Amino acid sequence: MADYPLPYAQYAESLKAGKLKGLKCGGCGAMFATPRIVCTSCGAPGKLQPHEFQGAGTVQTWTFVRVPPLRYQAKQNYVIGVVKLQEGPSVMGILQVEAEKVIQGMRVQLAPVMFENEVQMGFKAA
Ligand SMILES: [Zn+2]
């Protein structure tokens, strides 16, 4: 079995602590904000190393969720968006901003959200 350079449990614990850990490829320099086992840019195995992102980014796109997925029934009326981190990768997360105030290119900062004992990617206005 292959060794994961960033096991999900470690990723989630870091996120709970307000830190966004990801991976950087020692072969091609590509960065990833979510755990994976192989660099999906160059395909080189064993080159990914943990990397901590600053957590700053800009909103690329977003939507207002009125009807959540079944497992999130208790969490209605929230904004979810795609944030481009300043280091390059994009991540999806809950935007803790009023829907009417979100604009494309808005600067945001990592602010993970706890929901039913699970940590979720989240951002607040910077
Ligand atoms: Zn690579």
Image (cartoon, helix red, strand yellow):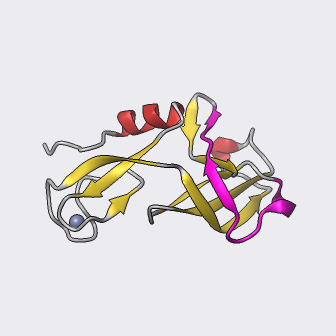
Q: Nearer the viewer, residue 36 or 76?
A: 36
Residue at the spot 36% in from the left edge and 34% down from the top edge: 10
Relative to 65, 70 lies left or right: left
Q: Nearer the viewer, residue 55 or 68?
A: 55
Residue 59 position (above or below residue 49): below
Q: Position of residue 74 (x, y in %)?
A: 75, 38
Residue 81 position (above or below residue 118): below
Please give the count of numbered marks on the rendered protein: 0
Q: Residue furthest right?
A: 100
Residue at the spot 82% in from the left edge and 59% down from the top edge: 99
Q: Position of residue 89 (x, y in %)?
A: 45, 63
Q: Position of residue 82 (x, y in %)?
A: 59, 63
In terms of image quadrants, where is residue 100? Answer: bottom right
Q: Is residue 116 magenta?
A: no
Q: Is residue 109 magenta?
A: yes
Q: Position of residue 112 (x, y in %)?
A: 60, 40
For ligand 1, the image quadrant comes to bottom left
Q: Nearer the viewer, residue 29 or 116?
A: 29
Residue range in magenta is: 98-115
Residue at the spot 24% in from the left edge and 53% down from the top edge: 37
Q: Which quadrant is home to the N terminus?
A: top left
Residue at the spot 73% in from the left edge and 48% down from the top edge: 96
